[in-house]
Image: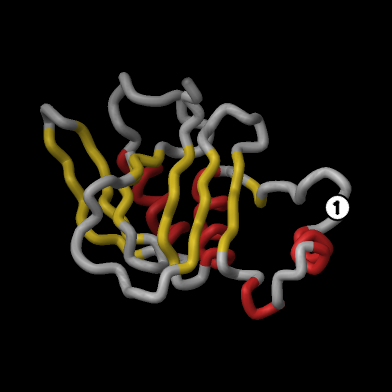
């Protein structure tokens, strides 16, 4: 059974939203298939009209450890709260277990706001921890932890 995990996001601008998430996650654009130097060359060879070149976009973990993130163009706007969201830690942080670095999380939230994210709400619960609910540039919720 195939156990690879891919996260799929609906988007109005797959490349723009993909570039945002690549920055957040430390990912990069998925390289073009073997035999092609660029995605533009690939899409031309496949006969895809230029107006469809932003129908899909994929980003990958450069170390190959994290899941692929695939963004697909959809016509409808986001409606309602996400049923699934991502919890994103700080770059270079070791993960959960120690006390949260509230100032570092707040600083990262401010940094991401400069890239189009929106801060929604800050949670500081003794039993559950500390996190900030954010929205990406297209309104998808995620948490900085």
* Residue 59 screen position, x and y as percent: 59, 48
Query: In front: 58, or 49?
Result: 49
The colour style of the image is secondary structure
Above/below status of 58 relative to 88: below
The secondary element bearing badge 1 is classed as loop
Q: Residues within 10 Å of mark 1 (few under 14, many from 20)?
A: few
Total numbered labels placed on residues in the image: 1
Residue labelled with disc 1: 36
State the residue lying farthest toward the bottom: 51
* Residue 78 screen position, x and y as percent: 30, 68
Query: Which quarter of the rendered picture does the C terminus lie within?
Result: top left
Query: In front: 39, or 128?
Result: 39
Q: Say which residue appears at 44% left-offset and 38% top-offset.
A: 90
Query: Is 64 on the left or on the right of 128, as rendered?
Result: right
* Residue 15 screen position, x and y as percent: 58, 65
Above/below status of 11 relative to 101: below
């Amino acid at each position: 059974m195939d156990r690879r995990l891919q996260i799929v996001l609906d988007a109005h601008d797959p490349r723009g939203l993909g570039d945002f998430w690549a920055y957040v996650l430390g990912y990069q654009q998925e390289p073009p298939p073997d035999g092609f130097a660029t995605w533009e060359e690939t899409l031309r060879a496949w006969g895809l009209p230029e107006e469809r070149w932003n129908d899909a976009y994929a980003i990958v973990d450069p170390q190959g450890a994290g899941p692929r993130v695939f963004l697909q163009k959809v016509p409808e706007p986001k409606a309602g709260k996400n049923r699934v969201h991502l919890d994103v830690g700080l770059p270079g942080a070791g993960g959960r277990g120690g006390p949260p670095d509230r100032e570092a999380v707040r600083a990262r939230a401010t940094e991401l706001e400069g890239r189009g994210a929106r801060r929604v709400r800050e949670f500081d619960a003794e039993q559950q921890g500390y996190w900030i609910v954010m929205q990406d540039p297209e309104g998808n919720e995620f948490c900085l932890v």
